[in-house]
Image (cartoon, rainbow, N blue to C red):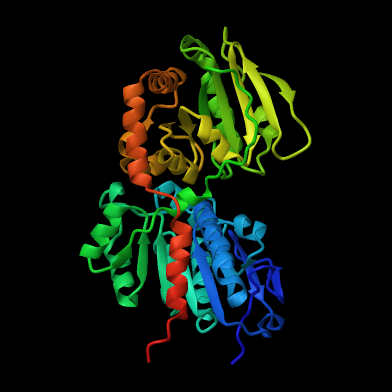
């Protein structure tokens, strides 16, 4: 029987992108030409979100280091276009969820309603068909996320392991591992790589083959050496607008709230607000979106821009406050930050994992009240939620800046919840051991 082969270092031969007729989806299909070359082992990575894609890429990089050419890799980014896989030259297959909620449709009725109108049912029927079509095409699968890739691997009848980056006992029973997920894992005799030790212990008690090898989310935060000019003694506040479709509006909203409470920040000394932006962030759109200052308040004035590379740092000033904007340098920003104003997803968790306390608030975009209701129990003492009002935000941020005891308590709570880095290498070594093991008769 012919098999599908993908080189770990180049796009799959014979793979072509085709537009899907269903709204809210994009499909990548394989042509027969892509099934001509055999390899030793065929691995499929399934992921369901931007952060999950980044974790998937970490695993891909480790597989390439540890297995070299002996494992071929394909990725099914089930939510979003899988840009991280594309950037890493990993073949993408399967129908992708491009619905309005960007993967959060189950967290609120309004979000689900928008998804339903945009083709929710048709999309998931196509993904179900894809999962069945993958039967026999892969030797092993790594599901990254929650029940969505877990179900897909199950429907594909693939031996698999779950990298459970989306669930934790810290979320509480409502958003932890449910009965269905535990049953599917037990039924498949699948290993679940839990994101923290407490969650691994709870899964073991439920009869799931769980292991804690570290948190792969922390493996994607690296310091690249991007220069972030600031005078000695400056308070640095990281600003994380996220990487989803509302990111420019989020950044503009943060700038507006900072300017409206300028006096509060100036009272604690020189302060730089450093915006960690995704690579494809549109800075012009951010400035167009920014609301004008209220009567009597100062606005932001753009000053200088370092030109030439994607590491360019642009600057703005509001009175004695300074804002810096840098792209693709999250690790560099968090390395110098005292606290973060955070409206992201995975980046929020990476911040607290590095001991940077988070102050957040609900937005009118993708991650609103419903998202924070789910996330805040996980963060515990590592994050503070405030109302989206300038004074409330400023009071929370400056309290953390000034109070070493509060800062230390929040930093400790974040590190405990997120766990240690180094998981990607350990997980891959374990998975490769399973793939090399002889099949059970």
Asked if residue 179 lies left or right of residue 116, the reply is left
Q: Confirm whether residue 95 shows in the render.
A: no
Q: Looking at the picture, does residue 299 appear above or below residue 386? A: above
> In the picture, which quadrant includes the N terminus?
bottom right
Occupied quadrant, residue 38: bottom right
> Residue 100: x and y, percent?
54, 51
Q: Relative to 418, is 264 above or below? A: above
Could you say where residue 333 lies in the image, as x and y percent from the top left? 55, 34
Q: Is residue 186 left or right of 128 when viewed as pictured?
A: left
Q: Is residue 294 above or below residue 372?
A: above
**Given the current orientation, which residue lies at the most extreme left position?**
205
User: Which residue occupies the foreground of this view, 259 or 296?
Assistant: 259
- Please report the residue visible at 65 percent of the width from the left and 43 percent of the height from the top: 279
Report how many numbered discs are placed on residues in the image. Answer: 0
Residue 407 locus on image (x, y percent): 36, 27
The correct choice, above or below, for 192 with respect to 102 in the image is below
In front: 418, or 69?
69
Residue at point 37%, 34% (across, down): 411
Residue 83 visible somewhere in the drawing: yes
User: What percent of the width, then of the height, locates residue 237?
Assistant: 51, 26
User: Which residue is more in the foreground, 26 or 255?
Assistant: 255
At horizontal 36% and vertical 69% (from top left) the residue drawn is 191
Name the residue at 51% across, 76% down. Answer: 129
Placement of the C terminus among the 4 image quadrants: bottom left
User: Camera-side residue: 274 or 219?
Assistant: 219
Return the residue found at the far right.
308
């Amino acid at each position: 029987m012919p098999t599908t082969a993908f080189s770990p270092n180049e796009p799959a031969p014979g793979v072509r992108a085709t537009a899907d007729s269903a709204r809210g989806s994009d499909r990548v299909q394989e042509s027969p030409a892509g099934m001509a070359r055999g390899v030793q082992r065929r691995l499929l990575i399934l992921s369901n979100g931007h952060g999950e894609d980044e974790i998937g890429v970490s695993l891909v990089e480790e597989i390439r280091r540890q297995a070299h050419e002996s494992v071929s890799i394909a990725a099914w980014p089930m939510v979003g276009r899988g840009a991280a896989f594309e950037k890493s030259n990993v073949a993408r297959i399967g129908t992708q969820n491009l619905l309005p909620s960007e993967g959060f449709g189950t967290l609120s009725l309004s979000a689900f309603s928008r998804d339903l109108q945009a083709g929710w049912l048709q999309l998931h029927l196509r993904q179900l068909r894809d999962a069945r079509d993958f039967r026999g095409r892969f030797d092993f699968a790594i599901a990254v996320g929650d029940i969505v890739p877990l179900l897909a691997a199950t429907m594909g009848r693939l031996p698999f392991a779950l990298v459970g980056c989306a669930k934790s006992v810290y979320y509480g029973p409502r958003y932890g591992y449910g009965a269905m997920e535990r049953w599917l894992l037990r039924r498949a005799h699948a290993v679940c790589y839990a994101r923290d030790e407490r969650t691994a212990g709870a899964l073991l008690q439920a009869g799931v083959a769980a292991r804690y090898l570290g948190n792969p989310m922390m493996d994607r935060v690296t310091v690249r050496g991007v220069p972030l000019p600031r005078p000695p003694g400056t308070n640095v506040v990281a600003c994380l607008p996220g990487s989803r479709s509302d990111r420019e509006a989020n950044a503009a909203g943060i700038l507006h709230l900072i300017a409206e409470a300028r006096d509060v920040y100036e009272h604690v000394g020189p302060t730089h607000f450093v915006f960690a932006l995704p690579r494809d962030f549109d800075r012009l759109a951010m400035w167009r979106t920014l609301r004008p200052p209220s009567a009597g308040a100062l606005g932001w004035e753009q000053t200088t821009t370092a030109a030439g590379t994607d590491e360019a740092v642009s600057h703005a000033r509001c009175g004695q406050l300074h804002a810096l904007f840098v792209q693709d340098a999250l690790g560099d920003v968090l390395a110098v930050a005292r606290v973060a104003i955070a409206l992201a997803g995975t980046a929020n968790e990476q911040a607290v994992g590095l001991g940077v306390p988070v102050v957040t608030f609900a937005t009118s975009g993708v991650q609103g009240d419903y998202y924070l209701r789910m996330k805040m129990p996980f963060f515990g003492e590592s994050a503070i939620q405030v109302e989206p009002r300038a004074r409330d935000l400023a009071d929370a941020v400056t309290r953390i800046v000034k109070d070493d005891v509060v800062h230390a308590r929040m930093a400790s709570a974040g590190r405990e919840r997120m766990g240690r880095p180094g998981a990607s290498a350990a997980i891959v070594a374990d998975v490769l051991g399973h793939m090399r093991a002889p099949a059970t008769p």
